[in-house]
């Protein structure tokens, strides 16, 4: 949430009036955000209850009738709905309070574990993930939020890459340039700007049978924008998708 500042309501009458109006606007925005969070929480609860009953009914049907393609399909769709609800809540939560929990962190402490885990995950899928050295720089960020965004981008590349994924990190002045590339089927040129929209599903085979909710890159875009960064998609030299992220770094002493 945003914080009101009593200091704004001091000084001349004109400044006090402007400060009071600003603080009232902050309170109104906070109330709107709280209501949105409450609504999403209530919707999540209401949706998960029938989903739980559906899963229980499906399990009972399995016991009585045995396994069948129809029951397996019901279970798959129920799992997808459950994942979608979780991703929706995650997308909403990244918009709240992140500006109040910023701290200066070395890039190595932010990225090393994530990159190591990503390489392990790629190996388990028979793929190769190569990573450049992490620059020795500091960044002011909300660590959990930012790492969740980068994890979504990298895991997306691992999922869709056929054999090879490349992650490159470069410090250019006071900006971090992160590039994640894969050798998958890629995304049509006219859809590159759309893949960061919630629920957008790419028309090609890249997304046809993924089973995802189309929210991972939307969550990443939202978090990166909150860190005054930018994100874009392009065709990778490997043949698949390139996702390029820029984020501000702390100035070197």
Image: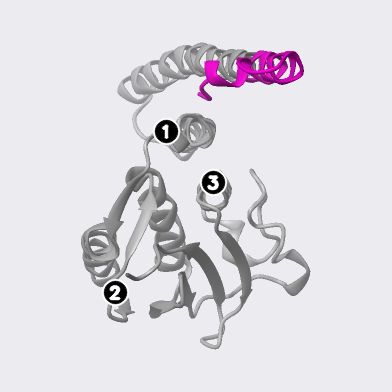
In the figure, is residue 121 to the left or right of 160?
Answer: left
Q: How is the image coloured?
A: one colour
Q: Which residues are magenta?
A: 1-26
| Separation of residues labelled 3 and 2 (CA atoms) | 22 Å
Which residue is the extreme one toward the bottom?
A: 237
Residue under numbered circle 3: 226
- x and y percent of residue 31 in the render? 60, 13
Cα distance, mark 3 to mark 1? 12 Å
> N-terminal of the two: label 3 or label 2?
2
Circle 3 packing at 10 Å, graded few (<14), some (14-19), many (20+), is: some
Q: Is residue 83 visible?
A: no
Q: Secondary structure at mark 3?
A: helix
- Please state which of residues 76 and 186 is positioned toward the viewer in this rendering: 186
The magenta stretch spans residue 16: yes
User: Residue 100: which numbered mark, if any?
Assistant: 1
Figure check: 198 above or below 36: below
Any mark on residue 134, and which? Answer: 2
């Amino acid at each position: 949430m945003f914080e009101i500042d009593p200091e704004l309501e001091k000084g001349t009458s004109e400044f006090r009036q402007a400060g009071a109006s600003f603080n009232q606007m902050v309170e109104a925005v906070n109330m709107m955000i709280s209501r949105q969070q409450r609504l999403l929480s209530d919707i999540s609860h209401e949706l998960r209850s029938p989903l739980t009953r559906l899963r229980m009914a499906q399990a009972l049907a399995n016991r009585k009738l045995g396994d069948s393609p129809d029951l397996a399909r019901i279970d798959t769709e129920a799992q997808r709905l459950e994942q979608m609800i979780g991703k929706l809540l995650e997308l909403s939560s990244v918009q709240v309070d992140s500006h109040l929990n910023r701290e200066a962190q070395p890039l190595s402490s932010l990225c090393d574990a994530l990159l190591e885990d990503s390489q392990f995950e790629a190996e388990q899928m028979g793929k190769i993930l190569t990573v450049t050295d992490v620059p020795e720089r500091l960044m002011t960020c909300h660590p959990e939020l930012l790492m969740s965004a980068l994890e979504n981008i990298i895991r997306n590349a691992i999922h869709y890459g056929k054999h090879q994924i490349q992650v490159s990190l470069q410090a250019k002045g006071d900006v971090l340039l992160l590039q994640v590339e894969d050798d998958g089927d890629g995304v049509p040129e006219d859809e590159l700007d759309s893949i960061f929209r919630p629920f957008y599903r790419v028309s090609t085979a890249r997304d046809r049978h993924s089973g995802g909710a189309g929210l991972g890159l939307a969550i990443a875009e939202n978090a990166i924008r909150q860190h005054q960064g930018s994100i874009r998609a392009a065709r990778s030299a490997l043949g698949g998708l390139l996702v390029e992220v820029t984020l501000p770094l702390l100035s070197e002493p």
